Amino acid sequence: MSEMSTDKSYKTILLERAGGVATLTLNRPDKLNSFTVEMHGELRDALKAIAGDGATRCLLLTGAGRGFCAGQDLSDRVMNADAGGRAPDLGDSLENRYNPLVRALRALEMPVVCAVNGVAAGAGANLALACDIVLAAKSASFIQAFCKIGLVPDSGGTWTLPRLVGAARATALAMLGDKVGAEQAAAWGMIWRAVDDDKLMEEARGLAAQLASQATRGLALVKRALNASAANSLDQQLDLERDLQTLAGRTRDYQEGVAAFLEKRAPKFEGR
Ligand code: LHQ
């Protein structure tokens, strides 16, 4: 898809597709892009559209305004006791909205770049950590805010955090809810890079465009291998690498990559 197309039908997100890159912007800036039931529905639709359009080869996720995402909108009706004083079923929110969102991002067969433009709190922080490559503005921060309201890190945070930063830091972050600045997050390996604020979107778009021009079928297989590695033994992972390499070796991009190397020219990958 060479022309820019903007889907205007969404109320809480923006979706633009151009040049093989889909840019999804969380768009409730007055509430720091916190999640509502409606936003979850729109994200679900948008991810489905991106996965099925046959042209998008990289997803870029970011937020509008000064925040990236402040997690669940705490004023949303599903978060509060009903008129009869009955506690909300937060597990239902996870089962039907957050968990499918994280699973959809992890299963999306293309690289997902996240440009964290400002504060990422609660499920907003863990949404970012569920992406494949995370850039953050130097002024942005990550807060495991859950413990401050008596909750457990969700959206995969108890899985991603210890793997990214180790058990000691993950435990303290989950129990204290301290704010981690972008540069600290990069130094700890929680994210890929911290970038000057005014360069964030330029860098993120450049990175997304680069990924979209790479051998993206292969990148989808890389993602599959890395996703599986956390639960696999070395033996299982070696078997998986064999199977995925068999698939990679059948792509047109592999043929093109080898031909380009031998002909001493730049490859022209198509994501097939
Ligand atoms: C908000 C929010 C917000 C509503 C800022 N809701 N309005 C999922 C579902 C199932 C189970 C439960 O768990 C979850 C996952 C979760 O994500 S739970 C964790 C929910 N998130 C939080 O606890 C974070 C709450 N927000 C904050 O602590 C602060 O707003 C942060 C540190 C993110 C930013 O602080 P500031 O930069 O000082 O901004 P602010 O607090 O002034 O917020 C700006 C506006 O956004 C303000 O509205 P107002 O009308 O007064 O201008 C806030 O009320 C609103 N806002 N977060 N989560």
Image (spheres, rainbow, N blue to C red):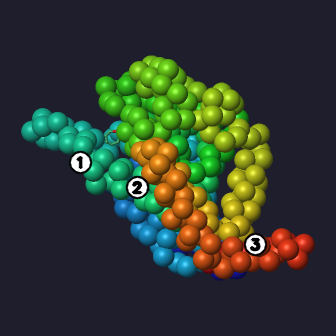
Q: Residues within 10 Å of mark 1 (few under 14, many from 20)?
A: few
Mark 3 vs mark 2, foreground winner is 3
Residue at left offset 77%, top offset 39%: 196
**Residue marked by disc 2:** 103
User: On residue 92, which mark appears?
Assistant: 1
Q: Is residue 39 depicted above or below 21 in this figure?
A: above
Q: Quadrant of ligand 1?
A: top left
Q: CA distance from mark 2 to mark 1?
A: 16 Å
Say what amino acid the circle numbered 2 marks: Arg
Position of residue 17 measured from the top left corner of the image (x, y, whole percent): 61, 71
Instruction: Give the residue pinned by disc 3.
Output: 257
Q: Is mark 3 within 8 Å of ligand 1?
A: no
Given contact means CB atoms under 8 Å apart, are the residues at marks 3 and 2 in contact?
A: no
Q: Is mark 2 within 8 Å of ligand 1?
A: no
Residue 194: numbered disc = none
The x and y percentages for residue 248 are 60, 70
Q: Secondary structure at mark 3?
A: helix
- What residue is shown at x 28% (from left), y 54% (from top)? 96
Q: Which residue sits furthest front?
A: 235
Q: Could you say which quadrant of the image residue 89 lies in? A: top left
The kind of secondary structure element at disc 1 is helix
Amino acid at pointer 3: Gly
Distance from label 3 to label 2 (Cα)? 31 Å
**Which amino acid does the dot numbered 1 rest on?**
Asp
